[in-house]
Amino acid sequence: MAAAILPPVPDTDTAHDRPLRVRFAPSPTGSLHVGGARTALFNWLAARHAGGTFILRLEDTDRERSTPESEAEILRVLQWMGLDWDEGPYRQSERDGIYRECIEKLKAAGAVYAAWETPEELDAMRAEARANKQAPVVRGRRDHSPEEIAAFEAEGRTPVWRFAVPLPGETVIDDVIRGTVTFDHAQIEDFVVARSDGSPTYNLAAAVDDMLMDITEVIRGEDHLSNTPKQMLVIRALGGEPPRYAHVPLILGTDRKRLSKRHGAASVEELEADGFLPQPVRNALVLLGWAYDDKTTTFTMGELIEKFDVSRVSKSPAVFDMKKLEVMSGRYLRSMDEAEFADALVAWLADTGYFDGKAADAPDLARRTAPLVQRKMSRLGEYDRLAGWLYRPLDIEPEALAVLEEDVKTSIQCIGGGLGRIEVLEEFTVDAIKDALSDQLHIQGVTARTFLEPQRIAVTGQTVSTGIYESLALLGRDESVARYRATLGRLAEQWTGGE
Ligand code: GLU
């Protein structure tokens, strides 16, 4: 038995043995950005893969910037993405007493000290450190006499409480993604844990919550890496054991600059408004740092749960490319079955207010157009460009009119030829329309493009639209004929006017 001769493995890391507990901890100060959404997805997948627990915690201690609207929006977007939580949402604003108790414990343990420095004194301290070529880290004075303290109090000063970072020393993170990251304590300032009004800072509250919520693995953005040793120090000072950490890489735009609004949609809400469905959005987000192999870009939720492994996330920055999302999204829309696509389209149009102010049968019309647009779009937001003309009276766009005017005579001949055939059709079906127009184009001896483009413009007023045969069938004979005539009338006016 091979196992018997192996030396026992020392059990130093109990976080590995406990069932996985992860958390997503957004600050409700705006909408959910692509980076936050990816963090949420990674945590959720890690939990579902391991049969663990996904906890939602709202870090709303910044009372000025946190809003209930933002909170509601974040919850809504998580639900939209299909990320359900098992515990929470906890709100840090409701846990103030817990943090204050922990601050008292830190005081009793001598892990923190009252710091009386004014902002000006702190600036001078940093400037002096820089002048001495030292890291500009703040260390408060701890040797005030009782008289000095009495004088500060008489002046109305109240202290903040700083963590006494042990010197010399170092804190080592065994990061799941980045490997060993060592922080020399000389580089870590005595960070504030309690403000002068006694309220906890982010580093205190996050550390306390991770400890008390029994989080086993913290998966979050690399921008938090420098907070991690501070939070580990707090947890250890409180007698706890820090979780494992996995810092996921930064997200850049295609220009390799940090992702922002300049790169198109930077929030999930905007992606949703542009008509991307959750499935391709999840695919695009999960690939920001993680890959299963070098070719698979489409995964069902079930496949992601099965395959996702946070230790396989890369530490190099990830690039968010809207074009790739569009490709994934178009592929996804085309892969949907017809009814599923129609449901998604009508629901999205209704949610975005598309039917507001339109005829009562507009949702029904949208459903009938679904098969006409399904293969032509990369996101639902392109619907109006393709099919919006159906909801409006004929209005020829200037660039479409210019196409007809390039050769007015031929345009009139083609539209007139088409009209002559469709107005006498017995059955106004896609096939009958197609046969008649194909026949006519051969009779006129022009190319398909020369013949069909004016037909499209005559009825839709646009150069881009749903397919011409299907569009005519959908409009019906009377409306089609009326539109042909109106366009012809308009061209004829120009023709004679120009003679
Ligand atoms: N509330 C922090 C943020 O939104 C996240 C903190 C954390 O994950 O520890 O950036």
Image (spheres, rainbow, N blue to C red):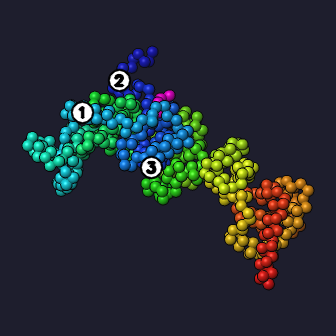
Q: Which residues are magenta?
A: 51-55
Count all numbered tags in the image, as a single digit. Answer: 3
Q: Is residue 475 left or right of residue 176?
A: right
Mark 3–mark 2 Cα distance, whole angstroms, equals 43 Å
Q: Which residue is mark 2?
A: 11
Q: Give the vertical position of 479 relative to 140 (above or below).
A: below
Name which quarter of the figure residue 93 lies in.
top left
Q: Secondary structure at mark 3?
A: loop
Comes first in the chain, label 3 or label 2: 2
Q: Is residue 160 magenta?
A: no
The amino acid marked with disc number 1 is: Glu
Residue 429 placement (x, y as % from top left)? 85, 53
Discs 3/2, front: 3
Residue at left 66%, top 53%? 355
Name which quarter of the figure residue 293 lies in.
top right
Q: Which residue is mark 1?
A: 104
Mark 3–mark 1 Cα distance, whole angstroms, equals 32 Å
Q: Main secondary structure of the magenta part?
A: strand
The amino acid marked with disc number 2 is: Asp
The amino acid marked with disc number 3 is: Gly
Mark 1–mark 2 Cα distance, whole angstroms, equals 32 Å
Q: Residues within 10 Å of mark 1 (few under 14, many from 20)?
A: few
Q: Quadrant of the N terminus?
A: top left
Residue 246 placement (x, y as % from top left)? 40, 38
Residue at left 39%, top 20%? 6
Residue at left 43%, top 54%? 258
Q: Give the vertical position of 147 relative to 265 (above or below).
A: above
Comes first in the chain, label 3 or label 1: 3
Residue 151 placement (x, y as % from top left)? 11, 46
Residue 135 placement (x, y as % from top left)? 23, 50
Pick the front one: 12 or 263: 263
Q: Which residue is mark 3?
A: 30
